[in-house]
Amino acid sequence: MRNFTRRCFLRTIGAGMILVSMAGCFASQKSFGPANPNIIYIMADDLGFGDLSCYGAEKIRTPNIDALANEGIRLTDAHSPSAVCTPTRYGVLTGRYCWRGRLKKEVLWSGYDRCLIEPNRKTIGNMMQECGYQTAQIGKWHLGWGDTEPVDYSKGHLGRGPKELGFDYSFVTASAQNLYPLTFVENHKIMSKLKPMDYYVHNPEIREVPKHEMNWHKSHADGPMVVAEDWQPYDVDKIYTDKAIHFITEHVQEKSNSPFYLHLTPEAPHRPNIMPEFMRGTSQAGIRGDHIQFLDWMVGQIVKTVQELNIEQNTLIILTSDNGPKSGGIDGTFGHKSAGVLRGFKTSIWDGGHRVPLIARWPGRIKPATENDTMICLTDMMATFAAIVDYDITGDMGEDSFNALGVLMGETEPIRESMIHHDYSGNFAIRKSSWKLVGKRLYNIKEDIKESKDLAKQHPQMVAELSELLEQQKKSGRTVAR
């Protein structure tokens, strides 16, 4: 199947453009050349299917992201592997559904949790390193540190994390901007002294942390409520943008003969919806709308840097989201539908919880102004990037990752028979072609995107078939045969 996919890819864009070694990277360093593209993967946080103007938003304007779509491809049936944050981040980096590991529901609740990705598991970062790429993880981390709990911040340096998981450089939050401790961590080094929290994380203007926040923290996080002495809550994503630009610029100036992989994970538009002054009040959809427009500004700065460094023609940029928007995104005052016409929001098994925007631009490779409704999952990034760099994924990698390179190139042939959805509470659903089974309820997604008509009684055989398929894939440990 892998050889067939490769032949299709070569037929699509021409031999010699991307694949430089038919032998593949395997597990050793290989030579690289100008055909290997730089890859910038940007995954926003809680960005909904209806939040971008190129996906129909009218109260929020995203001209920089719209330009990516106009110059590349916009997918309309892309899904995160989970309806919440941590498991999706695990799934993207490993190409494996997170529920196959220790986290069966919810998320990691603080920076005091141990590393979620298993010690011997390879990630996209490891894969790209082995293929000669300089790699960086910048942004929200939320995947834990080391292998013991609670994580000890008194030593000033944290255990197993981005470095061991394939990133030469990392600049991240210890967990997230709304989870303790609030501090930046650069190459595993805690960047500032920590002090007891003296303001409400969701509203820095409030000096006393509300009781409900204190009680929630005590029941979820195994560590103190502390913050960096020099924490700048309004500038977190601005700092990430600066770090990303510096990484790209320095790499091109000092290592122009090698490609880079940037895994950029902004906080935007996750709460707290706080941002630099110059973006406040710029949208017609309140502070969350402003935050999305700030995300658009970030993307614009990254694209501008790529253009100024004259690497645009050999750089693939992907923009997507870790899950759907938080409930309440539809606001009668603003008239904005954050999930578009979809049913449900973040945390839910319905499509609004996990169908996400996905835009890819690769000049000369991806046809401009293309739209594709072929179904993919963000776990497919590992196999997709492997196809680009000609890496042979072994049997213990990417168990749920299918090669979506053809989809990015505009091909409409299905790449996966099915896809498993997973929500905050640990519930499962399964999608096969147009059919989606949620418990015992059956929907035809292509004809009923709003998931409003239960067709289980009309199609009992399909209910039985999908129920059996779901159980088989859960027990098998994988959905990709390698």
Image (tube, rainbow, N blue to C red):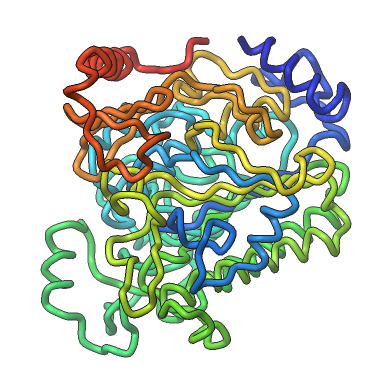
- Position of the N terminus, as image quadrant, is top right
In the rendered view, would you say 460 is above or below 234? above
Coordinates of residue 148 in the picture (x, y in percent): 29, 43
Q: Nearer the viewer, residue 201 or 421?
A: 421
Could you tell me which residue is drawn at 62 percent across and 71 percent down?
297
Give left or right: position of 245 versus 347. right
Q: Is residue 231 visible?
A: no
Q: Is residue 430 visible?
A: yes
The quadrant where residue 199 appears: bottom left
Could you tell me which residue is drawn at 57 percent across and 86 percent down?
278
Could you tell me which residue is drawn at 11 percent across and 77 percent down?
211
In the rendered view, would you say 185 is above or below 130? below
Give left or right: position of 254 versus 296. right
Could you tell me which residue is drawn at 48 percent across and 51 percent down?
321
In the rendered view, would you say 230 is above or below 307? below
Coordinates of residue 122 in the picture (x, y in percent): 52, 29
In the rendered view, would you say 158 is above or below 468? below
Coordinates of residue 322 in the picture (x, y in percent): 44, 49
Coordinates of residue 106 in the picture (x, y in percent): 24, 46
The quadrant where residue 7 appears: top right
Q: In this figure, what is the number of numbered marks?
A: 0
Give left or right: position of 224 versus 408. left
